[in-house]
Amino acid sequence: MTSDKDVCGTDPAPARLTVGIVSAGRVGSALGVALERAGHVVFGVSAISDASVRRATTRLPDSRILPAEEVAARSELLILAVPDSELPGLVSGLAAAGAVRPGTIVVHTSGANGVGVLAPLTASGALPLAIHPAMTFTGHDEDVARLANACFGVTAADDIGYAIAQSLVIEMGGEPVRVAEENRTLYHAALAHGSNHLVTLIVDAVEALRAALAGPGLLGQQSVDDQPNGLAERVLAPLASAALDNALRRGPAALTGPVARGDVAAVAAHLDAFEALDPRLAAGYRAQSLRAAERARTNPDLIDLLEGPRPDGQGRRRQRSVTTEAPDRPEKGN
């Protein structure tokens, strides 16, 4: 059996491909720029909304805006960069219209799907690939630059497909990572949990900080308002950046602060303060603190507090296995 390493030693992908993109959204237009920089030719894109048309004309000025079926029919490499919910319908429509020629490399950028969703086109002779950039896209210039530091989750039907996917990702400056077909949903869920929920966590923390910092400040101190990138964000940014870096480098040992220490009184006070400000913030803090306490294997009394009372009014104390020695953590925490 041929190993991945052996397959990757060959490069079955042509040096120059005629590329079509459906559609010119944030992801599709960024990938188009990256592919053009690698020497491929993005001849046409599908763009319906005003925002997509602007991205197409700005990022890919030499590409024509064409109907999706025409883009598909003329492509050697067809990128389907549409939302997850639209992908099955687009694939079925292109297959029913016979728009994709046999031998066309068809790539979708959905994180949640593998190559199975491309089955109607695979049956017509297309080569199916799932290539998902594990990156958030804003629609601004930084999107293309971030691709160079991103990993791409790739899934293919066979070793030749994996070799082509890896070649394309490397050409765009990214790092290809193999994801099994049956694990795509878990892969996507993990990324959504780690990125989207991080945004919610930070926004909630900023909201609370704004309330805490409101009122007269020191001489020359910026006033607190509800605009992004203000004083609250500057207070939180170094701490949040260090916490993220520590988590990626040290895992659960990066946990610090009152939850990791098992400080019941401090956490109870936090809950009261959040409850007074916004019960929704308190609910989020409680849920995240409980998960952190379980990770840290901390004081069982704290876990009981965070789990809350049972409907019968009794506590939820359970027998737990709690380590007597906490893992090594940074000395000081918040």
Image (cartoon, rainbow, N blue to C red):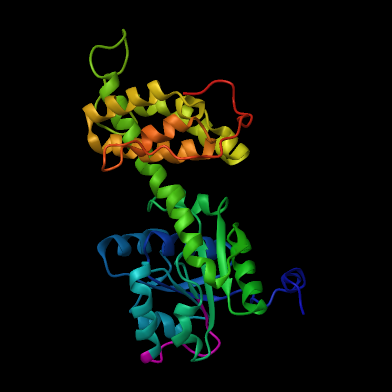
Of all residues, the one furthest to the top in this rendering is 219
Total numbered circles:
0
Tell me if residue 105 is in the magenta stretch. Answer: yes
Q: Position of residue 99 (x, y in %)?
A: 41, 88
Q: Was residue 112 drawn as part of the magenta stretch in this picture? A: no
Q: Residue at point 73% right, 74% down?
A: 7
Give the residue at x 53% y 71%.
182
Residue 107 x, y percent position in the rendering: 50, 74
Q: Position of residue 95 (x, y in %)?
A: 40, 88
Q: Is residue 111 above or below residue 215?
A: below
Q: Tell me: residue 211, above or below residue 175.
A: above
Q: Quadrant of the N terminus?
A: bottom right
- Principal secondary structure, stretch drawn in magenta: loop
Residue under the point 38% across and 51% down: 138
Q: How far across and down, in percent of the image, does residue 233 sit? A: 37, 29
Residue at 60% x, 74% y is: 16
Q: Is residue 13 left or right of residue 110?
A: right
Residue 53 makes an appearance in the image: yes
Residue 8, by quadrant, is bottom right
Q: Quadrant of residue 228?
A: top left
Give the magenta-colored segment's residue range: 96-106
Horizontal side, residue 333 vs residue 232: left or right: right
- The residue lying toward the viewer, choosing from 284 and 19, is 284
Whether residue 253 sits left or right of residue 88 in the image: it is right
Q: Is residue 262 left or right of residue 46?
A: right
Q: Quick one: 2 or 97, which is closer to the camera?
A: 2
The answer to whether residue 15 is seen in the rendering is no
